[in-house]
Image (cartoon, rainbow, N blue to C red):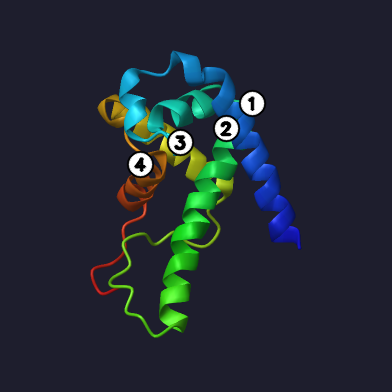
Amino acid sequence: MYKTILYLIILGLLAAADDAPAQSLSSRDSAYPNYLTGNALWLACGQTVDGNPPDACAFYVAGVSDGYSTTRLAQITSHIDPGPRTVCIPAGVSGDQLADVVRKYLSIYPEIRHDYAGLIVLSALRAAFPCPTSQ
């Protein structure tokens, strides 16, 4: 029940965050008309609140991270080989810390902001938290 409520809150925040800046996004965003792009995520993650990333940013990043982990778990429990792990987030890493990693990645690589935000988040997490080669 808690996760359902959390997901609904996240969806609402993302919808609110995505509506306002949509007019300022480049025409390249049309490649992903049904998905959040890195440009929209950059806008959602841009301003910090008391040194922390905005909730919409942190929730989106946490959702992508949870989705990655849940997909892997579903494959394993269905006896489907998910392949090697590519993201290994250490215990104790907070949602705000994950969002900070993505914010930094978006600032270092502005040339990819037109791409699908979910893939950008995974790329940022993979770069920051690579798995040991034995995973």
Disc 1 to disc 2, how far (Cα)? 6 Å
Badge 1 density bin: few <14, some 14–19, many ≥20, Cα 10 Å: few
Q: Position of residue 101 (x, y in %)?
A: 43, 40
Q: Which of 11 and 102 is in front in this view?
A: 11
**Residue beneath disc 4:** 120
Dot 4 or dot 2: first in sequence order is: 2
Q: Residue at x 63, y 42 (%)?
A: 11
Q: Which residue is drawn at 40% across and 44% down?
A: 121
Q: Do the residues labelled 1 and 3 touch (CB within 8 Å)?
A: no
**Residue beneath disc 1:** 49
- In the figure, 23 relative to 133: above or below? above
Badge 4 density bin: few <14, some 14–19, many ≥20, Cα 10 Å: many
Q: Where is residue 125 in the image (x, y as percent from the top left)?
A: 38, 49
Residue that protrudes farthest toward the bottom in the picture: 79
**Residue beneath disc 3:** 36
Q: Which of marks 1 and 4 is in front?
A: 4
**Residue beneath disc 2:** 53
